Image: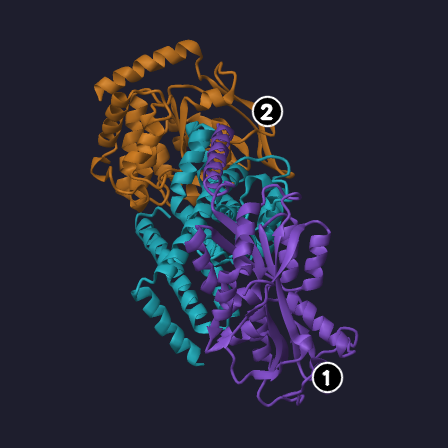
Amino acid sequence: MSNAGATLQRERVATSAVQSLFPLKVRRLVYSVGKQRLIDGIDLTIEQDRRTIIMGPNGAGKSLLLRLLHGLLTPTAGEVCWGETPRIDQARQRQALVFQRPVLLRRSVRANLRFALKLRQYTRAEREERLRHILELASLSSLADRPARVLSQGEQQRVALARALVLEPEVLLLDEPTVSLDPVSVAAIEDLLLAAHRRGTKIILVTHDMGQARRLGDEVVLLERGRVVEHSPALQFFQQSNDPAAGSLCKGRKFVC
Amino acid sequence: MLTARLRRAWVVLGLTLWLSFSGTGQAEERFIILQSTTSTQNSGLFDAILPRFQTKTGIEVRVVAVGTGQALKNARNGDGDVLLVHAKPEEEAFVAEGWGVKRYDVMSNDFVIIGPANDPADIAGLPRAGAALRKISQTQAAFVSRGDESGTHKKERALWKVAAVDPLETGATWYREAGAGMGATLNTAVGMRAYTLTDRGTWLSFRNKGDYTILVEGDSQLFNQYGAILVNPAKHPHVKAGLGQQFIDWLVGPEGQSLIAGYAIAGQPLFFPNAPGGE
Amino acid sequence: MQDFGQAFALALQLIVSADPALSEIIFLSLSVSLSAVAIASVIGLGIGATVGIVRFPGRGALIVFLNALMGLPPVVVGLLVYMALSHAGPLGWLHLLYTPTAMIIAQTVLVTPIIASLSRQVIEDFHSEYREQFVSLGVPLKTAVAALVWDARYSLLTVALAGLGRAVAEVGAVIIVGGNIKHVTRVMTTAIALETSKGDLALALALGLILILIALSVNATVSLLRLSASSRAYV
């Protein structure tokens, strides 16, 4: 692992020398469908080192924002700027997104990971080494040759996360990755996230789960009806919760704030 | 990328097709296409005589059986080497227009009118086909026509003319056009309990007769002449004139004629060879 | 009707005795239809994948057109191919009329829209499931198409089977362009038509039973394949 970590560092130095992805600047971002402004003028600056949590009630536009940040959707107005990267698809190549429902290929776990690895110019030996390493890291070694889609939801999400991590992205975007998972699976995913962050990966996580936000978050962005209503350090967010929206979100949850 | 792959697929497809036809379409191959009629095929005559020709000459005769009208049209398009059909006026026109080289009389049989045993129009034993048809129209008994421009259909229409009845003009519901080959028309007639006109050969070899019998036969109007024509290589240079002529010569020659004479079902000959100088 | 009992007995006897004339007809039927389906799969899958994945102007109209072509009557296809391959037609110089190749061409024309249309639907469904993930991963188009086709292979196999069913059962096209020539272009369906027209209903029905038997066994094989695939959640 330390070995792979070292390679990772070298790559990061090389790429950041070209163009940094940070700070991420979102300016007057609007996304509408028909006449509905689902994202309604978001301004946001996000720094590299923090684990950013995006929260908000259903329909607040959390998933949309994540897709706009990743360039899966084209904004109706405004812009998303990843540092000095001129084009969002260039930024996207240095990121990975984990969806709420994992989209795995109809193949074995190993083949799913290999599929992702083959998208990069690795030699066969490198590829197999990374594959072995990530399987171990995500505790998937014993499941490697099982068809990915017969695994439990939690295991599938672990595969999806492993596939995201195996390409060693600089930014990891996650859209409620642990919703409807059992506590053990949730803990496994969170451990992987924290480990990735320790290796220098930027984390942007959408979640409903207050407990998870507390465990993982350095800062919280609170969305409501397509707007940012609060953007503050986690400690401050959870202690004060003076914003009525944040307060009501807290009370509305069954999780302890 | 995708288009490059598609283009490659097209090339492969083209190659495959070229390879598969290059093996079958060469003019030197020892086979001819015989455009003939369903009545001849259904009678079983070809199965009886063609293997003998092939054994002797090594020439395979590939029979395409359609109605006489369709056979003439196909031959006009050059899709055949030899015709064996039964509609003398059209055959003569075919040769006169230059599509065929020469017409040869080959054999004959006769048409018969068949119907159910209870014979609702009471035509059994009538000597004249025209009179029988007139009675069918008068009693409005069901009649099934080939309706496919075949030799049999042309003959049937000629007989209605003799009977001075136009079954189409009266808008008759008893007159049905099957638009099908001889065998299929027989199936239809038996199924509908209707009368129909058929050549004797097909009738004798037909296996789904039910209680049907021959009711009218022997009228000279019912004579059915078959002729063979070589498609004119001057019009269609790819016609295998040599092999085709060899087949016609064999058909009208002693061996072909005696084989035709010898083909019988239940002791009844189906065709009577009548090529001049054949026997 | 005593024809049924007779037909079953005859069919059984023909199969058990491995009647050479029958074997020849079955072999030709299968090789013509399988070739046609193979060629139609290459073309149809190419069209289906392209239309299923790529957005372009006129795509909706093309889909409607492809769907409409699925119902193309075999006789019409037969007639069109006859007119093309006839010596008086534009492709007459190929000397293909009344050959198995002509039958393969006709059935390919008949089956390609079916495979294109059905595989378009399959690929499009898979693509809408995979699209965002593929964009996120930065999968190039060529790799994406290959992955979609591979992952959809069991569904596409069923599509090819639908094409095979249509090809092997049709009579209208092959009888026109093949001519139902004994030992050359006589396939199961044209043989059935011929035996029916001879009034030999038992033999026709026996041939029909064998055709059904072949269709059944091919279907059963694919069903088993799909079953084992779905146990791995691959369908």
Q: What subunit carries mark 2?
A: A
> Measured from the top left, where is residue A67 in percent x and y?
49, 32
Against B33, residue A55 (above or below) is above
* Helix, strand or loop for disc 1: helix
Q: Amino acid at mark 2?
A: Gly
Q: Quadrant of residue B56?
A: bottom left
Q: CA distance from mark 2 to mark 1?
A: 94 Å
- Rendering coords of residue C151 (x, y %): 39, 41
Image check: B182 left or right of A218?
right
Give the residue type at disc 1.
Ala
Mark 2 — residue?
A78
Q: Colour of chain B?
A: purple
Q: Find residue C209 and report its horizontal and vertical position in percent.
A: 40, 67
The hue used for chain A is orange
Residue at 52 percent across and 19 percent down: it is A87
Q: What colour has chain C? A: cyan
* Labels 2 and 1 share a subunit: no
Q: Are marks 2 and 1 in contact (CB under 8 Å)?
A: no
**Residue nearest the viewer, comparing C73 with C124:** C73
Q: Is residue C73 visible?
A: no
Asked whether B279 or A34 is in front, the reply is B279
Seen in the picture, residue B258 relative to C55 is either above or below; the reply is below
Q: Quadrant of residue A167?
A: top left
Q: Which residue is depicted at the point 76% across and 77% down?
A: B162
Q: Mark 1 — residue? A: B131
Task: Provide the chain ID for the residue under circle 1.
Answer: B
C114 vs A99: above or below: below
